[in-house]
Image (cartoon, rainbow, N blue to C red):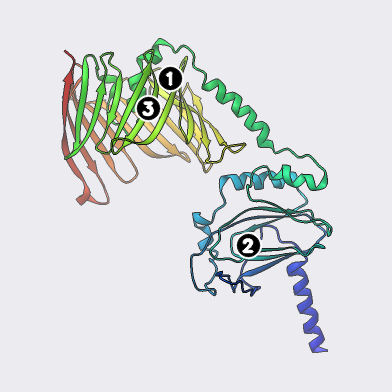
Amino acid sequence: MKNTLILLLLLLFHFFSYSQPVKEYFPTGGNTTKIEEKNKIVCLTCDTLILNSGKPQIIAYKINKRNISNKNFPQPTDIELRNNMYKFSKIMDREIFELKNNFQNADLHKIYKNTYIKIKNDANEIINFLDLENFYEGIIYWDGKSKSKIIRNDNIILSSELFSKQSGENIISSYINEFANVEQEISKLLTPSTPTKALIEKTNLFLINTFFDDNFLPTPFLSFNKVKEISIEIEPDKKLIFIFNELNQLVNYNTQITKCEIQYKNGIPVLNKTTINEDQILEENYFVFKENSISVENDNYIRTYELHENVFFETNVFEKTETFSYDSFIKNYKLNINQDQNCQTFLDMDNVPNSICFSNLNWNLPLNITKRAKNLIYNEKNIYNNTNNEFIIEDIGINRTKKYTFKIEDGILKKIDFQILYPNDIDSSKNYTMNVEYKFYK
């Protein structure tokens, strides 16, 4: 009687372990599959997942190769699985979102570890993810019917379209229509039109302080009339060089490592080409001027900036992915502008609310610029003139403060004193003078 009771409990455990599909399945190592394959490093301590008929099943998987020789090497722990290397791609996350909406009766299984999967259909299909030297990624669907076979999509995208054919449906992923709308919006953004006079006049401001966004120069207070070159020694053996044409337009921005060339057509920038090691192209950016906005396109994104008085606010970001098709533009970030409060608000990639606020948009001094995330200030710039009529920028970060003191005469930069302070590491703090040299057209 005792043995019969134990046997019954074991059978019940087996039934609830395998007959009831587990949503968001994460293999845990409790059930071991031992399979030998010649000339392959096959996991001997990995999980088995058994899927019974009766309900649709979706398996999304990304299994990294292990590059080990020990077949008994333990699978990644739950803590290790939190590492970014195990996370699904944005494309996979988007496809899972679509499948959840389009196949609401299906159970979803997410596989991150080497796993052996048995499908209880008439064909007794097997999915073998045990080769430790292989990388596996894709989505599998089974409608749960005994006579049906699994459908596997290693391309990930358009899974709803592929899987719905098994039931004779014609499901269309929502991002297909979204993609068509995005294409139309992008087409409008990338169609040039006559820029305003104000936008043309602010081209150097855009290039120096927005496009090359790591730059610290007080561009609105500088004159580029007849300036051929500005060379700033920011550190010993480390220079920034700005080169202008005779129309006062920036044509080169060079560092010790990179050279950025800006090409013009009809007086408007059309291309920025950044090279390294003299001739190796690092990046190409194409500019489209349109009334009061500038769009920048490269292999990674399309960004659009609108001019508001003397400030360029970013209004759109279209992120691109490596694969071309309906996943070409993975996400469109809309950035809102509150003109009354001189602020820009947006959600970052983690949906955290961010903002950038200016005390005024004309660069009237004193000027305060604050950057917030979750309503907490993480960066603040105070810009003002001191009693010596020097131009000051205080750049206050979380762990450091930078202070630039500019000596400017008639729009010409004479000297820059720089100080950086680390409150938690005083020994790393430093200050020095940046030497500035000008060359002029005759």
3 vs 1, front mark: 3
- Quarter of the image with the C terminus in it: top left
Q: Which residue is mark 1?
A: 307
Rendered location of residue 421, percent (x, y): 24, 44
Disc 1 and disc 2 in contact, CB within 8 angstroms? no
Q: Secondary structure at mark 1?
A: strand
Identify residue type, mark 1: Leu
Rendered location of residue 335, percent (x, y): 51, 30
The tag on residue 272 is 3
Q: Please indicate whether residue 301 sits to the left or right of residue 205 in the image.
A: right
Callout 3 crowding tier (Cα within 10 Å): few <14, some 14–19, many ≥20: many
The tag on residue 433 is none
3 vs 2, front mark: 3
Q: Secondary structure at mark 2?
A: loop
Q: Please indicate whether residue 182 sits to the left or right of residue 307 in the image.
A: right
Identify residue type, mark 2: Phe
Residue 257 in view: yes
Residue 22 sits in quarter: bottom right
Question: Measured along the vertical axis of the image, is residue 98 above or below residue 125?
Answer: above
Q: Nearer the viewer, residue 437 or 383?
A: 437
Residue sitting at x 55%, y 68%: 75
Q: Nearer the viewer, residue 26 or 59?
A: 59
The tag earlier along the polypeptide, 1 or 2, is: 2
How far apart marks 3 and 1 lie (CA) works out to 20 Å
Residue sitting at x 64%, y 43%: 157
How far apart marks 3 and 2 lie (CA) works out to 47 Å
Rendered location of residue 393, percent (x, y): 27, 31
How far apart marks 1 and 2 lie (CA) works out to 49 Å
Callout 1 crowding tier (Cα within 10 Å): few <14, some 14–19, many ≥20: some
Identify residue type, mark 3: Asn
